[in-house]
Image (spheres, rainbow, N blue to C red):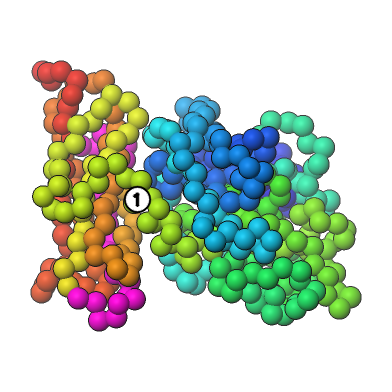
Amino acid sequence: MVATVTSHTDTRNRAYAGEGFDGVVRVAVGGYYGTGVLLYDGHAVLTAAHLFTHGSTAASVTFETTVGSQTATASRVALQPTYDATQGNNDLAIVWLSSSAPVTAERYSLYRGSDEIGQSLTMVGYGLPGMGATGELTNYSGGPLRLKASNQFDADAGTLKSGLGSAMSWTPMPGTQLIADFDNGTTHQDALGRLIIRPGTGLGQDEGLITPGDSGGPAFISGQVAGIASYTASLVSGGVHPDIDSVSNSSFGEVAAWQRVSYYQQWIDQSLRAQYTNAPTQPAQVQKAATEGNSGTSYAYFLLQFTGVRSDPNQLLSVDYRTRDGSATAGEDYLAASGTLVLYPNENQAAIAVEIVGDYQAEPNETFYLDVTHPVGGSFGDGVVMLTAVRTIVNDDGAWL
């Protein structure tokens, strides 16, 4: 990724290792490839379902981090159950890794708000490089590049369909896809301004659009995954054709769509929880000590239970959580975790998984904390604003002297 205003050789367009994007990965499936993003559990990658429509689920995932390139195979792939290739709907897949992701790769939480439209986004991926004035470089023969660019979510794809009618040959489900256009600062290439009266002339030299190979790549809002890249289009309506070269090639005047992660958060969250190994389902099963292991990461679990009664059976309940050092140090002994845990309808409990870092170093047993705050839909009790739990990381590498 991506087609940008300036050349891919411009350093502002590169997502170098160590800059916060090392959890954006290259996903290879058969003879095809796309992009994906490592989720908050450290074992699953969110990407696009259409990468798997050629019949193979034998995927591999390549990380580029500060310690170099590492490739992991997939142990399991799940497509969103209602994926519709014809209409571009529900175009999501989760790839579980055969081993934990590199400790040096960022894990990302989900953007859960419903206010994405109008917000700036950062897109990152491994698609063909290109420039807005000329489109993607179909003859590019260099190695894979992880590029980045910015844009703004301009509208819901259902709004675009309502405005264009039959001029748009597919029908997005309302509320499930976010769209942006590739602006060059002029009103002539302002696709959504001209097509559905959503004017905006772009972000200048930071602007970009997805290209082939970016499928499944993330669009971040404030560091959280808000969208998953799905497709691009060059649209014509009533003689209005904003595309600068009238060719579908990710050039100025085209639009792109991302699957809206906030809409799919329940499927994503519950799919990940279902794959947790030996997660507790009742308080008696909670283990307050976790053995560190020798390599990779393993899980220490915390269990959140709601013991009240929902006023509305469809009500969502949530809390925010964040780890905190005790004698254990984040990044060395465990991986810092923070986010929002949501309990969905018919769900009154869920586990929070924190990754413990394995090594061969003899050291004392160490502790860390999980703070839980901001309950929505319930409370911790009168006057209680925070709950805290502690876990002990048990040394398994001999005596510490």
Give how far across and how far down residue 369 sits, in percent: 19, 47
Residue appearing at x 36%, y 46% in the figure: 275
For label 1, the crowd category at 10 Å Cα-Cα, with few meaning under 14, some 14 to 19 and many 20 or more, is: few
* Left or right of 51 on screen, residue 247: right
Give how far across and how far down residue 12 sits, in percent: 64, 45
Residue appearing at x 33%, y 67% in the figure: 344
Q: What count of labels does the image hold?
A: 1
Q: Is 206 one of the magenta-colored residues?
A: no
Give how far across and how far down residue 193 sits, in percent: 74, 75
State the image quarter where residue 347 is shown: bottom left
* Name of the residue lying farthest toward the front: 55
* Left or right of 188 on screen, residue 337: left
* Left or right of 11 on screen, residue 189: right
Residue appearing at x 69%, y 30% in the figure: 143
* Mark 1 residue type: Ala
Q: Is 330 one of the magenta-colored residues?
A: yes
For this rendering, which residue is in front, 104 or 31? 31
Residue 203 shows in this picture: no
Vertical relation: 387 (above or below) 217? below
* Left or right of 288 on screen, residue 322: right
Q: Which residues are magenta?
A: 309-335
Residue appearing at x 65%, y 58% in the figure: 85
Vertical relation: 189 (above or below) 98? below
Vertical relation: 225 (above or below) 327? below
Q: Which residue is mark 1?
A: 274
Q: Quadrant of the C terminus?
A: top left
Give how far across and how far down residue 83 sits, in percent: 58, 59
For this rendering, which residue is in front, 323 or 256? 256
Predominant SS of the magenta segment: loop
For this rendering, which residue is in front, 157 or 219? 157
